[in-house]
Amino acid sequence: MTYGMVPDTYGGHNLAVDANGRTVTITSIHAGVDTPVLNKMLEQPETLDKVGVLREQLKGKIVMIAIDRLESLKGAPLKLLGLERFLELVSLSCCVKHMQ
């Protein structure tokens, strides 16, 4: 088995592991939110109105939010299935709604 760092298309590096003729690339990404911009948006009247509507629509429901790269090979459907299984394990499956 060999390993090393290889550059990615975003200016960072990934860990590449060669094992048994197969190369596996491991990446760690940091996704962030520009807090000052977000806070300014949250102060806007139309945002506050929409938040009120969403709070009413989602009252009594659990909402889980994540930031992820939306690339075709990132496995978003598998992540959603994993989330569904997790919720089933903790008896929250009544709250699962598939969205596309």
Image (cartoon, grey):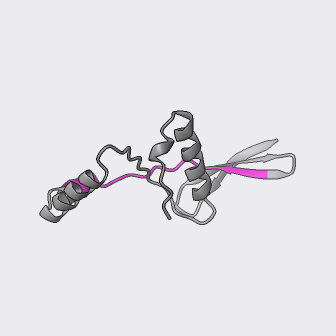
Q: Is residue 85 magenta?
A: no
Q: In which quadrant of the rendered image does the N terminus lie?
A: top right
Label count reads: 0
Image-quadrant location for residue 86? top right
What is the x, y in percent for residue 38? 25, 56
**What span is in magenta?**
23-39
Note whether 14 is above or below 45 in the view shown: above
- In the foreground, 48 or 21: 48
Q: x, y percentage for residue 80? A: 55, 52
> In percent of the image, x 82 and y 52: which residue is there?
22
Q: Position of residue 35 (x, y in %)?
A: 26, 52
- The answer to whether 12 appears left or right of 65 in the picture is right
Q: Quadrant of residue 52?
A: bottom left
- Considering every residue shown, the one lying at the far top of the view is 90
- The residue under the point 41% across, 46% down is 64
Q: Position of residue 55 (x, y in %)?
A: 25, 51
Quarter location, residue 89: top right
Q: Nearer the viewer, residue 71 or 62?
A: 62
Residue at 47 percent across and 54 percent down: it is 97
Please name whichever residue, 10 or 77, is drawn nearer the observer in this view of the structure. 77
Residue at (14%, 61%) from the top-left corner?
44
**For the view shown, which residue lies furthest in the left direction?**
45
For residue 96, side relative to residue 21 (left or right): left
